[in-house]
Structures are given as structure tokens and as C-alpha cells.
Amino acid sequence: TPKVKSFQQSVWALVLWPSLLTASTMLGCRDDGSFSRSTSISQEKLLERVIHHAELIYRVSEESCTLFEEMFIPFPMHLQTNQAAYTCITKTLPIPSSRSEIQQISDKWLLHSVLMLVQSWIEPLINLQTTLDRYDNAPEMLINKTKWVSEKLISLEQGVMVLIKKMLEEGMLTTDYNDEDVFQHGAQPEMMDSVMRDYNLLSCFTKDAHKMEAFLKLLKYRQTDKYNCA
């Protein structure tokens, strides 16, 4: 499996910039929490809305994960779900994990880490929708919740990109990771193994959604502290 390449191998901003321009044109921040023409509002207000989006995504993903476990994971296998038998698909991404690493990275990399996580989960969550449709007796509530999260994640991606455009004036950041490295699927597993993999995917996303929320809230804290000290 190809590994994630070094941060310093490509100019990220040059790749991302067309997306930023498109997002800033199409998006804005209306009172309903969606993003459209967001460049018309302040950076502080935009960050608040992005955080609110992330909070909702984490909350609903946690509810979905609990519902999935109650419906499809036999009680004797609950302990196995807490073991490291399945690897999260974002494990190879260069995301800071320890408290010391998180404290040392810049505001730029906090945002970049959120964007990497968001973009890495869009396709797997869409694929999960197809998988859930094949389940017998999958509750409509679970299907609706995961679909809602998938749609809101795309909206969050747009909001984060507009926020990056506002905050990173120099627009130059380097990284190079291949989405193909993240989305890897083995041969068709047995039914129970398939269920466990889907549960693990949902569980891993919930953890990453919590990271997104935490990173954004830390960014807000830093920005607020910066303004207070100015």
C-alpha cells in the first residue's frame, strides 16, 4: 500500500485554490446554518457557524453509532468492537493526535487537519448509504441520520474552505496525500464481518467528527485570545 507522502512534497494551496474560489462564490451563511456567499460575513461569525455545523455532525453521528450497535451488534461481540481488530481509514493521515502536537501546530494546520478529515470521510459515508440499503430491517431513523451526516459533511467542507480563504492570506501550504490510499476495501467479507466493518467505520467517523469539532473550538479559543491580547 502506498504511504502518505511528506508534508513538503507539493504546494497544497495551488491545488486547493480553484475549489476555494468556487466555494466562496457559491456559498453563503444564511440564518438556517447553510453556507452560501460566506465571504460577506465576518471571519468570527463564519467560524461560529462552522463550529455549530461540526457540533451537530458529531452529535448525530454518535446517535447513529449507538443505534447501529443496538440494532446489529450482538451483545457478546460488544467487547470486540472496542478492540483494535479494525483500523480506521484515516489512520495514515498526518493528523496531530497527542495534546502536545495539537498545542504546537499553527492555526493553519488546525484548519488543514479539519479539511483533510472532512474530505477523507465524504466518499466512505456515501458508500455506507449504499451498504445500509442492503441491510434487512435497517431502521429508517438510522438511514436518515447517516444520510443527513453525509450531506452536512459536504456543507462543512465548503464552510471550512471559505474559512481557509479568509484566514490564510498567503494561501501557501504544503501536503500531498492520495485519497486512493485512504479508501481501501478488501474482498467481500462474511456477513457478520461486513457488519462489524460498517460499525467500525461509523465508530471511527464519530471519533474523527469529535476531532473536527475540538480543532475548530481550539481555533476559536486562539482567535479570541489573540483579539483580547491585541
Image (cartoon, rainbow, N blue to C red):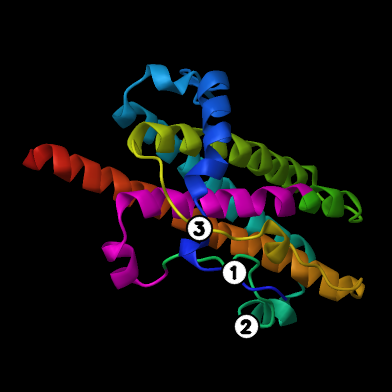
Marks 1/3: CA–CA distance: 9 Å
Name the residue at 33% across, 69% down: 101
Residue position for label 2: 83
SS for tag 2?
A: loop
Taking the spot 54% from the left edge, 19% from the top edge, the residue there is 25
**For residue 195, which numbered disc appears in the image?**
none
For label 1, the residue is 4
Quadrant, the N terminus: bottom right
Q: What amino acid type should be assigned to the residue bearing mark 2?
A: Gln
Instruction: State yes or no: discs 2 and 3 in contact (Cβ < 8 Å).
Output: no
Q: Secondary structure at mark 1?
A: loop
Q: Residue 3 or 39: which is nearer the viewer?
A: 3
* Residue 4 locus on image (x, y percent): 59, 69
Decide whether residue 103 is among the magenta residues.
Answer: yes
- Cα–Cα gap, marks 2 and 1: 25 Å
User: Where does the image place residue 66, in percent across and percent down from the top left?
Assistant: 63, 59
Please state the extent of the stretch shown in magenta in the rendering.
Answer: 97-126
Q: Residues within 10 Å of mark 2 (few under 14, many from 20)?
A: few
Q: CA distance from mark 2 to mark 3?
A: 31 Å
Of residues 55 and 112, the one drawn nearer to the viewer in this rendering? 112
- The amino acid type, in three-letter code, at marker 3 is Thr
